[in-house]
C-alpha cells in the first residue's frame, strides 16, 4: 500500500512526530509513504500564513525525513515531498527556494485562488456561490498542473460551491475532461471523507469515473492514527468502487 499525503507538526495543525507516522504506517501494512507537509512559501510581503511550515523550518524537515529514509530502508520506502498551491506570481520563487533541497515530489493542493496574500484571494474550502471564483479555481489549477511540476492533484473537489447544482455539474464535467487530457492522478481525500467535509463530492467523482481519470487515495494524515483507521478507509474505497473507480495502487515517482 502507498500514501503520499502525510503532514507533520511543522504545519501548525498536525500532531505527532515524524517517526510516529512511519511507525503507524508500518503497523498498518504500508510499503511506501511520502511526507508532503504544507510548503513554506516565500511570500513577498509581511503576510503570514498560519497553516504551513516556516521557511527556517525547511532544513529540519528535510533532514528529519531523509534520516528516517535511511533508518527504515529495510522496512518501508519513505519519500520527501511538499503539498503546494499554484500561486502564479510567486510559483517560480517557490521552486527556486525548494529545489536545492532535492525533494522527491510535489502535490497540488489549491487552498486559495489568486496568490493567498492578495486582497482578492479566496479560501477554497469556504462556501461560495460565485461562478467567478469557481471558474478561477478551475483555470488556476489547470494552469498549475500544466507546469509539469506536480505528481498529482490533491482533493480536486475542495472548492465548496453552493450555487446552482446544474452549473456545478457542467463546470466539473468540463474540468474532469481537461484533467484527463493531462493524465494526472486525482486524489480522493480521506481526511475530507473522515471529517465529513464537502469533499469527496459524489458528483465530481461520478464524472471522474465516466472519463476514467486515474485516481489515487491520499490519507492527508494530520495524526499518525489515521494510518490505522482501516474501517473508514474501506468505506471510502467502497464509495469509489460503487462508482466504478479502482484507485491506482502502485504510483511510480
Image (cartoon, rainbow, N blue to C red):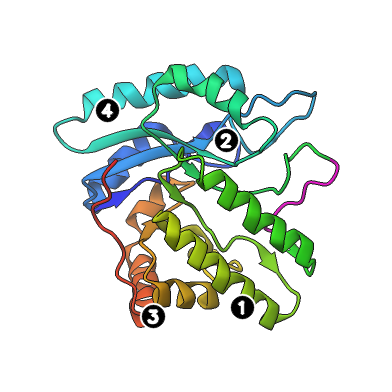
Magenta-colored stretch includes residue 121? yes
Q: What segment carries the magenta color? A: 119-125
User: Please, what is the dominant secondary structure of the magenta stretch?
Assistant: loop
Label located before the other in sequence (2 or 1):
2
Residue at screen point 52% across, 57% down: 155
Label located before the other in sequence (3 or 1):
1
Labels 1 and 4 touching (C-beta < 8 A) = no
SS category of the residue bearing label 1? helix
Report the residue marked by disc 2: 11
Labels 4 and 2 touching (C-beta < 8 A) = no
242 or 152: nearer the viewer: 152
Q: Position of residue 24 (x, y in %)?
A: 31, 45
Task: Report the mark closest to the observer, 3 or 2.
Answer: 3
Residue 243, label in figure: 3
Residue at screen point 34% across, 71% down: 237
Label located before the other in sequence (3 or 4):
4
Residue at screen point 52% across, 34% down: 9
Amino acid at each position: 500500500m502507498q500514501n503520499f499525503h502525510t503532514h507533520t507538526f511543522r504545519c501548525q495543525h498536525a500532531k505527532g512526530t515524524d517517526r510516529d507516522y512511519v511507525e503507524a504506517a508500518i503497523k498498518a501494512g504500508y510499503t511506501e509513504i511520502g511526507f508532503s507537509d504544507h510548503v513554506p512559501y516565500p511570500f513577498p510581503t509581511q503576510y503570514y500564513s498560519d497553516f504551513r511550515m516556516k521557511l527556517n523550518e525547511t532544513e529540519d524537515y528535510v533532514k528529519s525525513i531523509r534520516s528516517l529514509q535511511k533508518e527504515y530502508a529495510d522496512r518501508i520506502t519513505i519519500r520527501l515531498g511538499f503539498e503546494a498551491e499554484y500561486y502564479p506570481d510567486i510559483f517560480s520563487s517557490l521552486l527556486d527556494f525548494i529545489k536545492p533541497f532535492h525533494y522527491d515530489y510535489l502535490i497540488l493542493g489549491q487552498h486559495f485562488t489568486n496568490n493567498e496574500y492578495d486582497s482578492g484571494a479566496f479560501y477554497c474550502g469556504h462556501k461560495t456561490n460565485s461562478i467567478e471564483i469557481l471558474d478561477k479555481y478551475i483555470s488556476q489549477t489547470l494552469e498549475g498542473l500544466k507546469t509539469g511540476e506536480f505528481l498529482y492533484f490533491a482533493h480536486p473537489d475542495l472548492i465548496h460551491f453552493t450555487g446552482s447544482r446544474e452549473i456545478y455539474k457542467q463546470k466539473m464535467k468540463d474540468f474532469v475532461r481537461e484533467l484527463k487530457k493531462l493524465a494526472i492522478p486525482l486524489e480522493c481525500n480521506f481526511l475530507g471523507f473522515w471529517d465529513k467535509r464537502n469533499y469527496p463530492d459524489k458528483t465530481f467523482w461520478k464524472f471522474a469515473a465516466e472519463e476514467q481519470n486515474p485516481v489515487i487515495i491520499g490519507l492527508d494524515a494530520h495524526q499518525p492514527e489515521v494510518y490505522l483507521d482501516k474501517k473508514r478507509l474501506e468505506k471510502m474505497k467502497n464509495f469509489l468502487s460503487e462508482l466504478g473507480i479502482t484507485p491506482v495502487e502502485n504510483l511510480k515517482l
